Image: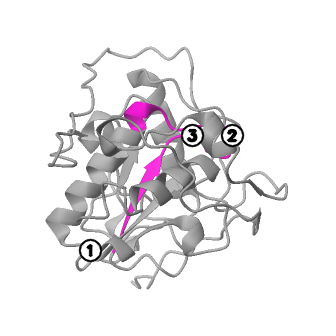
């Protein structure tokens, strides 16, 4: 039985990106620079040619969120506060067993073999999911099943962040992900749920992303130059204009990641 060297992933059609200022994001409380929609959308623009629905790497059609699903309410933990001088803290992570009973097809994935970089994505699906627990569970399960249908071992990302700021464990970090074509080796994939060419991550999601990146950079000793976005590694619009703007700010001299 053979094991693929790397799970294939086609990308979005190449975007046309206009010139923009890399540090266009606004600064706000706690040094995070939480972004207002008007600040980023006006600062940097990109367009993507219309593509066929259902191709690998594109949003799953239609929006997979089941709005009226019956589910057992579970507590919603707010994202942990970020103390001045101690950026990040320890993130609260929802275990994988809280949203799926499915196990990864481990025979289809290579072992991670250590983590040396992080890549940030959006899922590119409209609309942004409701922050309630059931909507997020259905979104994640729909994405996981879509990825399984492409012959992958599991959902392609290692962590997901929802609009409420919860961080969800996805693919086990012991397994190589499937989120950047030909560059999944030693690469931790983090996805924010939403299409951030059309919307802006909530302040809670922004705060949790900063917390997660800070925590993993310190825990794994990952250099700032190895914290990237999908479009910085491949011809794609992912993670969208507003999330790209946030990442630019977090990594700028005034951002919370620059001093790590």
Q: Is residue 197 magenta?
A: yes
Residue 153, quarter of picture = bottom left
Q: Position of residue 92 (x, y in %)?
A: 20, 39
Q: Residues within 10 Å of mark 2 (few under 14, many from 20)?
A: some
Residue for point 57% across, 62% down: 22
Q: Nearer the viewer, mark 2 or mark 3?
A: 2
Residue indicated by mark 1: 115
The disc at residue 6 is none
Q: Is residue 170 magenta?
A: no
In the rendered structure, which disc, 1 or 2, sits on the residue that comes first in sequence? 1
Q: Position of residue 19 (x, y in %)?
A: 73, 65
Residue for point 29% across, 38% down: 30
The disc at residue 194 is 3
Residue indicated by mark 2: 198
Mark yes or no: residue 213 visible: yes
**On-image quarter of the C terminus:** bottom left
The front one of 192 and 16 is: 16
User: Mark 3 falls on what kind of element?
Assistant: loop
Q: Position of residue 130 (x, y in %)?
A: 51, 23
């Amino acid at each position: 039985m053979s094991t693929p060297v790397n799970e294939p992933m086609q990308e979005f059609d190449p975007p046309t990106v206009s010139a923009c200022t890399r540090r266009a994001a606004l600064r706000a409380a706690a040094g995070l620079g939480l972004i207002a929609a008007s600040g980023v959308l006006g600062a940097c623009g990109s367009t993507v040619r219309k593509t066929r629905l259902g191709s690998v790497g594109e949003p799953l059609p239609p929006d997979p969120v089941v709005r009226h699903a019956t589910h057992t309410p579970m507590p919603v933990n707010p994202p942990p506060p970020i103390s001045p001088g101690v950026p990040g803290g320890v993130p609260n992570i929802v275990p994988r067993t809280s949203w799926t009973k499915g196990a990864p097809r481990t025979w289809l994935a290579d072992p991670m073999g250590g983590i040396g970089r992080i890549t940030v994505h959006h899922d590119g699906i409209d609309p942004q999911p409701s922050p309630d627990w059931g909507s997020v569970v259905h979104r994640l399960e729909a994405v996981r099943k879509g990825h399984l249908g492409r012959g992958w071992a599991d959902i392609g990302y290692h962590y997901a962040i929802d609009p409420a700021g919860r961080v969800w464990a996805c693919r086990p970090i012991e397994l190589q992900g499937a989120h950047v074509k030909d560059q999944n080796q030693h690469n931790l994939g983090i996805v924010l749920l939403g299409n951030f060419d059309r919307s802006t991550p909530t302040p809670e999601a922004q705060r949790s992303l900063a917390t997660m990146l800070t925590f993993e950079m310190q825990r794994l000793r990952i250099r700032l130059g190895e914290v990237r976005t999908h479009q910085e590694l491949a011809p794609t619009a992912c993670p969208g204009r507003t999330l790209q703007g946030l990442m630019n700010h977090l990594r700028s001299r005034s951002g919370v990641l620059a001093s790590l």
